[in-house]
Amino acid sequence: MKKLISAAAALLIVFNVSAQVQQEEIHSSELLYQKTKRPTMVIPEGPDGDTPPAQLRAVKFKTVTPTRKVVKLTPAQQLIVTEADAPIAMRAMTGNFCASPVVDEALEPVYASVKAHMPLFLPYKSSKVGVWQGFYYSWDKNEDGAKDGHGAIDYGKTGVEANEDPTFGVYAIAPGKVIDVYWSNGGGNIITIEHTAPNGYKYRSTYLHLRNGYDNDRANAKNSPSDKYKKFANNGTTSQLCWGTNAQKIKVKKDDWVQAGQFIAYAGNTGSGGIGVILDDDGTFTSKHENTRSFNVHLHYETRVKDTRAGHANDWVLVDPYGAYNHAGVDCYDLEANSPYARLYAPFYPSFHNVPLDLVNKYWGYYTGMGMGLQTISVDKAGSTLFSAGSFQWGLPGAWYARFYMTADTYQQYFTQYGKQGFRPRQISVTNDGSGNPRFSAIWEKAPAGQATYAVHNRDDANFLAVWKDYVTTKKWHVQEHIDYTVNGKRLHAAVFVNKPNDNGFYMYYGMSATDFDKKFDELYKNWELTSINVNGNTVGGVWRPKKSNYAAFYGMTSAGYQTRFDELAGQGLRLVKVQNYSDNGRFSAIWAK
């Protein structure tokens, strides 16, 4: 073991990575869980898109009590719990709703059966965009159902400056096949994509009012059966801020396969339901919107699922991807709001960082409920908030437990409890609470048959060296996981020792300067793979095991730097193996491998 201390941290670059493809807009990793933005401008009041389906126009809507029951999501082969003393314990997604749901009573059983079977993401990436209208129009609360129906979510910029193009990029919510690209008088340019989850469950996403080139869109409008839309196309503004440019065209065609987050089009106001709601019958802007800067450029977005009712096997039902189904407006779309039905949009990305731990707890069932497992987790404190970084992934073998922000006594309690069930810690991270005491987050895995485990924590250097001599030097056990951390100025250790590891040895170093760590990394890289990395103050350490494939490791990364590296390495087919957030959630270390 080396115990070298340096005052500097470094970023370790393992191999060259390909250049990041420039996106149309800056991607914000915080976008999924930031507070829903309120528009600062007047939002047009009036129906948009194609004519709403019959069930949204011709039935009476009622306030109902959702039939969805609170169930503990425990996918096969997985045992999942969260730490009770985390800042906010996992909350049931029922009760204390933002507003009571208002739904078609006949469709309520369908709404109640809907859940996320695959991650679905917001159809935009611009931080300037927010919700304009929800699944039911907030400006019309009639009980007769004649005008209530929207069946979609409207997204648009929450404010538009003078001479600013009001458009924004539109992105596929999930991987899938483009099943239609067409023009409709009401909805303008429309794209529909079908998404199939690993278990075969299907969703359809539809994007309306898109731009598809200045000349094309004006030509379609000039032939519109809607008189005021036709008049506007012939006699109204020719501004590209309204109509877009010839370069702003749809980027996909029917039968294309797309990836989650792939750019597909630009938002617009095409179709009589797009620009039409701010026009008078003579094709001029209404007095309320005569000085509009947005030109009602927005995305009308729809989510559909197969109808589960008897006799409706071939029908698709519009559903609220937020699970809100009410008139209460923007607040009901915040992640902090409890929705009466299942939320389909991902609350954060499967591989995430800078996410408050209370949101991981609250939406614990989103990824675990679709069968994804927790590969890695780290918790660090910044101010009064606990932030988490981690990764839910498909295909992780075996059963597992995860607990966060535990005291040393609680960690010992669960280590003993799970050990009796044949589980051992696989990954450990430590942060300090407000009093400087260590708090542990850990993932347990099922230990291989016949393989014993011995784990320690809060051991000082002398005690840890004694354990090392006993288990490694004398008994020839291996170290599977090791971290060192500082409490009241003293370095402490947590580690997992195993016998019969079924490989050809290991290396472990801690307390190294950045320079020495980099040298050791270069020395071992050819034959040894870094499987655990840990930064403690300005020192670095890690555990190496026999190399299986190419991999990458970085440390000292800022949040933006970590996101950049993640995007680059994910594009090369590497998955996140371990992540650590530290220095008041300001820095990150991570390992990626095949």
Image: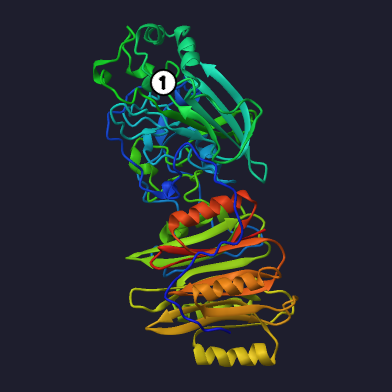
Number of numbered tags placed on the structure image: 1
Residue 147 to residue 448: above or below: above
Q: Out of 146 and 412, give the one closest to the viewer.
A: 412
Residue 201 to residue 12: above or below: above
Q: Quadrant of residue 240?
A: top left
| In this picture, residue 593 sits left or right of residue 95 | right
Q: Quadrant of the C terminus?
A: bottom right
Residue 147 to residue 464: above or below: above
Q: Quadrant of the N terminus?
A: bottom right
**Looking at the image, can residue 480 be seen?**
yes
| In this picture, residue 249 sits left or right of residue 179 | left
Residue 568: % across, % down:
57, 51
Q: Out of 367 and 63, give the one closest to the viewer.
A: 367
Q: Residue at x 43, y 51 (%)?
A: 94
Q: Residue at x 45, y 40 (%)?
A: 125
**Looking at the image, can residue 426 be seen?**
no
Residue 132: % across, % down:
36, 33
Q: Out of 185 and 570, give the one closest to the viewer.
A: 570
From the image, tell me which residue sits under label 1: 274
Q: How is the image coloured?
A: rainbow
Residue 285 to residue 453: above or below: above
Residue 267: % across, % down:
45, 28
Residue 397: % across, % down:
68, 62
**Crowd rating for badge 1 (residues with CA inside 10 Å; few <14, some 14–19, many 20+):** many
Q: Residue at x 43, y 43 (%)?
A: 65
Q: The disc labelled 1 sits on which kind of residue?
A: Gly
Q: Secondary structure at mark 1?
A: loop
Q: Out of 308 and 235, give the one closest to the viewer.
A: 235
